[in-house]
Image (cartoon, rainbow, N blue to C red):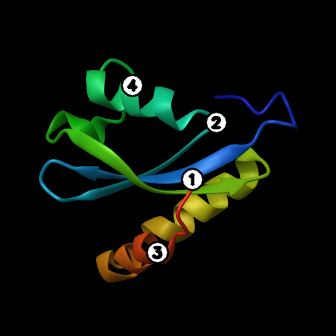
Amino acid sequence: MTDSNPDKIWFVYMIETADGKLYTGISTDIERRFRDHATGKTGARFFRTTSPVRVVWQEKQPNRSLATKREIAIKKLSRQQKLALIVRQPAS
C-alpha cells in the first residue's frame, strides 16, 4: 500500500480469530482487508493457521506513518491491554 493520497484516512484495527487470538493491522479499507485475510489470497500469513472472525476494534489515523507507529505500539501491548482497548472503544 502506498500513501500517495495524503487525504486518505488510515485505520489501525484488531481482528479476533476463530481460536481467540487478536491480530493487529492497518488499512485504508478495513472491510476489504478483512476479506483479504478471510480468503487467504493477499491476507497476512498469520491467518494461514486460524480464521478471522470479526473486527473488534478500529481507530482512525490521519496518515500511514502514524497508523504504522500506532500499530507497532499496539502490537507491543499485552493481551489484557488490548482487551482493555476493545472494551473502551466507543460505539460507532
Q: Residue at x 22, y 59 (%)?
A: 21
Label 1: state its secondary structure.
strand
Query: For the residues marked 1 and 2, what is the alpha-carbon distance in whole angstroms?
Result: 9 Å
- The residue identified by callout 4 is 36
Q: Position of residue 91 (x, y in %)?
A: 52, 63
Contact? badges 2 and 3 (CB < 8 Å): no
Query: For the residues marked 2 and 4, what is the alpha-carbon distance in whole angstroms?
Result: 13 Å
How many neighbours does mark 2 have within 10 angstroms: few (below 14), some (14-19), or many (20 or more)?
A: some
Check disc 3 and give the amino acid type: Leu
For the N terminus, the image quarter is top right
Q: Position of residue 38 (x, y in %)?
A: 28, 29
Q: Residue at x 49, y 52 (%)?
A: 13
Which callout, 4 or 3, points at the residue further toward the start of the chain?
4
The answer to whether residue 85 is above or below residue 40 is below
Check disc 2 and give the amino acid type: Thr
Quadrant hosting residue 4: top right
Contact? badges 3 and 1 (CB < 8 Å): no
- The residue identified by callout 3 is 85
- The residue identified by callout 1 is 12
Quadrant hosting residue 92: bottom right
